[in-house]
Amino acid sequence: MKRTGIRTDATKHLVERWRVASPYLGLSPRRLTTLVGLSFTKAVAEVVVLVVVAKVAFALAGPDSADLTVSLGPIRDFSLSPRQAILVALLSALTMFSAAMAIAALAARAAASGAATARTTILRSFSSASWEVQARERTGNLQELVTNQLAQVTVGVAVAVNSATAALSLAALLVGALAANTTAAILMMASVGAISLAMRPLRRITKRISKQRSQNDQEFATGVTEAVSIALEVRVFGVGDAVEGRTRSAIEACQTSMRRLLRMRGFVPAVFQASATLLVLAGMAFVVFAQLTSISGLAVVALLFARALSYGQMFQSALNQVSELTPFVAELHRYEQHYTSAQISTSGAEVERIGDLDFLNVTYSYGDGEPAIQDLTCSLRANERIGLVGPSGSGKSTFVQLLLRLREPDSGLFTVDGCPADQLSLQSWYQRVAIVPQFPHLIEGSVGENIAFFRDVSQEQIVEAAKRANIHEEIVAMSAGYDTLVSGSGGAISGGQAQRICLARALLGTPDVLVLDEPTSALDVRSEAAVQRTLDEMTGSVTLVIIAHRMSTIRHCDRIMVIDGGRLQAFDTPEVLLQQESFFKEAYDLSQG
């Protein structure tokens, strides 16, 4: 009973592993069935060729070759002349070739389909995950998952094909050997089984090394992406050697795990081949010295056994590759589940317009730490121009993320025109809000594409948004106007232009709520004046929330929020705060020199 339970658990484990891996491999039930059928056809055809060739060759060497009839093993009542046998072998060889070509085409389709499906699934899961999960994502990790990690898994299609082909061919060869000589075939099966059991520890070692390689590759990818993003600082601070040293350590770790893995790839087939050869020689010696078979039957078994040795080695190599790929599959599945479990619902009441925003005793904390926002109560009236100030780390960014519904309060209530915000559709909500981040993020494409930002809009709408952001004239003066190409880092355009392109992007959707995070902190006087002019033109038509340290940016705000230590310290007009709030007064005095 105990052994039966162990077998059942092992079977369930294998079924579960296949269930997890199959979507990444592109092997649907239909494709898998076709693969098995083609592999079986190829295997049977090969056995027929080998048996016929061995029988014909042995018979033609004898004295009665002119009257030869060939027995096809299990088809004992059906004999062929040498010419007929050769024709059968030729047709079987053509069948082998056709099946092999079909298997190659199926494997190619499965690999391409599996990679595309896996990338789509993982990227969709990530994009649908909560902002909490997205914000914690390690730099370069997602790119590594859908490129190098997935590329390793795609190899699994070839592994699956080789496994199916080798296993079915091995089984067909064993059946053919049984038909030719039962005793020798039993010895052959015992040899294959013994070798397979002996190789299991090596496969476990391979799996452990491959897991370490997967982790090393991810850490290296993260380090490279980070090094690219901070290239300017690295050069200016003169820390290139230190960064290179850290990268070199990651490279050496990858090198070590790859060297160990490649060594195992060569070691496993060598061990199998040596063990199988010794067992074959021992088995053949036993059969010969014990005089248990005829020379004709022994010739067929020997030929089948030699071929079985090749397929056995192929099968063991495939099993070893499965051990290599298992950690990569597990890692992809783990992240997919991680993203999927963090998906947020976008359903709810449609948002036609965002008016008054009210926070009542709202608290939010990151994990088990101190609350980033604590017991905050305030009201933002529709179309107000609100300034948001406070020391670094005071909770300003967290408040903005709560305002934009990127995060949900741990406690308290956030309402929109009296309706709890969590009852409103996120999909329609995000069509009514916008943000201009402190550091502009441009995509690879034209200026016009950066303003459109994946939205289906007309050229007229793009131009109108650029005019509202006071960047239209400068775009027109560029070499290709709105078709001027820019890179993610900005390329040939200035920081001020990039900031205003992002502002045009935000204004394109005519939002009801617009958040600007330090919109003028890195701008020259001319660019700052252009942004200020845009903000003045928007006054009264949109709810503006401006995070700023420059008093010049928020001097025309209707009211200003002062947040410190996660708590709302004051919320009033600039005139009142100058008289009553120490932090604001100090910041104002410093700005005046």
Image (cartoon, helix red, strand yellow):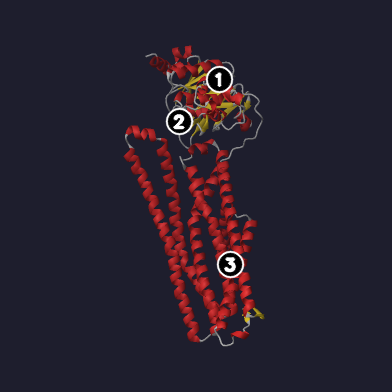
Amino acid type of the residue that numbered disc 2 sits on in the rendered structure: Gly
- Which mark, residue 168? 3
Give the amino acid at mark 1: Lys
Is 497 rendered above or below residue 109? Answer: above
Q: Which residue is mark 1?
A: 467
> Looking at the image, can residue 472 be seen?
yes
Q: Note whether 24 is above or below 192 in the view shown.
A: above
Helix, strand or loop under label 1:
helix
- Given residues 105 and 369, the one toward you in this image is 105
* Quarter of the C terminus within the rendering: top left
Task: Give me the C-alpha separation between circle 1 and circle 2.
Answer: 22 Å
| Residue at the image position 45 percent from the left and 28 percent from the top | 492
Number of the front mark, 1 or 3: 1
Q: How many neighbours does mark 2 have within 10 angstroms: few (below 14), some (14-19), or many (20 or more)?
A: few
For this orientation, the residue located farthest to the bottom is 63
Q: Residues within 10 Å of mark 1 (few under 14, many from 20)?
A: some
For residue 1, say whether it is visible: no
Q: Residue at x 48, y 45 (%)?
A: 144
Q: Residue 517, percent across and down?
A: 48, 25
Q: Is residue 395 above or below residue 240?
A: above
In which quarter of the view is residue 270 placed? bottom left
Which amino acid type is shown beneath numbered disc 3?
Leu
**Mark nearer the N terminus (1 vs 2):** 1
In percent of width and height, residue 565 lies at 44, 26
Q: Residue at x 35, y 34 (%)?
A: 235
Residue 491: assigned label? 2
Query: Of discs 3 and 2, which sits in the foreground?
Result: 2
Identify the mark nearer the N-term, 3 or 2. Answer: 3
Disc 1 from disc 3: Cα separation: 69 Å
